[in-house]
Image (spheres, helix red, strand yellow):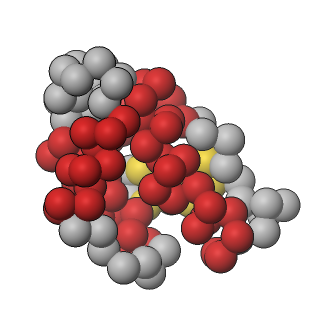
Amino acid sequence: MCQTVFDEIDTEKNKTISITELENATKKLAEQFKMAQPTKEEIQKEFKSIDQNKDKTLDFKEFKTYMRSLFGKHLQYSYFSMAHMNFIDIGQVRVGNRC
């Protein structure tokens, strides 16, 4: 499931996610869950801290870390019981509980 999300966010289809792609996806997710929109600075700070190899893109492993840190606890405990959280559909983006 997480690979599907990654592939859909990777609009450039280059097997990495740029900061712009991540900002767009994060905005959609925050809207879907009626969360406060993270600021561009917050997203960039988190992006930089997770970009382990400092190549200014997120590979799949780095992306999973980002999703868990930004949305994991909020999704698990605030909006959905784990029993009912199979996926969330945000247009073309789906986020699963096993990312």
Residue 6 shows up from this direction: no
Number of dots carrying numbers? 0
Answer left or right for 20 relative to 2.
left
Q: Residue at x 19, y 35 (%)?
A: 18
Image position, residue 22 (x, y; %)? 27, 46
Q: Is residue 84 left or right of residue 72?
A: right
Please tell me which residue lies in front, 4 or 42.
42
Res 72 seen here: yes
Q: Quadrant of residue 74?
A: bottom right
> Looking at the picture, how far across and down is residue 38, in whole percent?
30, 68
Viewed as shown, does residue 92 lie left or right of 19? Answer: right
Instruction: Say above or below: 45 vs 27.
Output: above
Residue plotted at (38% across, 59% down): 91
Q: Is residue 32 left or right of residue 54?
A: right
Q: Quadrant of residue 66?
A: top left
Looking at this view, is 30 or 47 the one in front? Answer: 47
- The residue located at (19%, 21%) in the rendering is 55
Point out the residue furthest to the right here: 83
Q: Residue at x 33, y 64 (%)?
A: 28
In this rendering, the answer to whether 21 lies above or below 91 is above
Residue 24's place in the image compared with 7, above or below, is: below
Q: If the image is split into quadrants, where does the C terminus sit?
A: top right
Give the quarter of the figure containing the N terminus: top right
Tell me where residue 41 appears, x and y as whole percent. Answer: 18, 60
